[in-house]
Image (cartoon, helix red, strand yellow):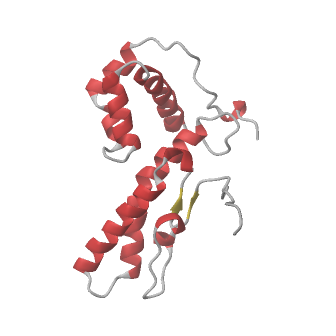
Amino acid sequence: MDRPVPHRFPANLRRRYDRLSRFPNGLVVLGDAVCSLNPIYGQGMTVAALQALMLRTHLRRHPAPEPLVLCRELAHVAATPWNLATGADLALPGARGARPRRARLMGAYLTRLHEAAASDVVLAKSLLRVSNLVDAPSALLRPSVAFRVLARRPTHRPLATEPSEVKE
């Protein structure tokens, strides 16, 4: 018997089957085959389970699966965790990728939210519910959450998020 070997995939990867003009009948692609996420966030198995639930729903509506419709439904399930994982990774120095203005603003807000959540149980709970895919990311922008985040003075300098500050 061989010793375990860790699988190290150095990037998030999303395959956009939903953008194909045709897809083979009888083939179903789920989980990491659709969207492989940084395992540090612990969302891969949850995304696969949510996709399995979507497959069940699809098969109840379509006794003969509609491949392109199913691909779009599965891509929709993967969209939120994909945005969470890639957005968090882009906040790290050295990460490669475009950082539009909206992403930089959200990155700065999330940096403050993470810092505040370290000592605020309400914010910690809100953050964990989004990270664990229980609540939508928009829950972090509710006035009750945003007020708590923005009312606190940040004590640490945010991570580099400007493209010019990122080493490639």
The C terminus appears in which quarter of the rendering? Answer: top right
**Most foreground residue, 149 or 8:** 8
Residue at the far front in the pictured view = 1
Q: Position of residue 26 (x, y in %)?
A: 43, 87
Looking at the image, residue 37 lies above or below residue 26: above
**Most foreground residue, 129 or 74:** 129
Image point 38% across, 34% down: which residue? Answer: 127
Q: Position of residue 145 (x, y in %)?
A: 31, 26
99 with respect to 102 (left or right): right
The N terminus appears in which quarter of the rendering? Answer: bottom right
Image point 55% across, 50% down: which residue? Answer: 39
Image point 32% across, 68% down: which residue? Answer: 54
Q: Position of residue 152 (x, y in %)?
A: 40, 13
Looking at the image, residue 4 lies above or below residue 123: below
Image point 67% across, 35% down: which residue? Answer: 163
Q: How many marks?
A: 0
Residue at the far right in the pictured view = 168
Q: Position of residue 147 (x, y in %)?
A: 32, 20
Looking at the image, residue 28 lies above or below residue 132: below
2 with respect to 43 (left or right): right
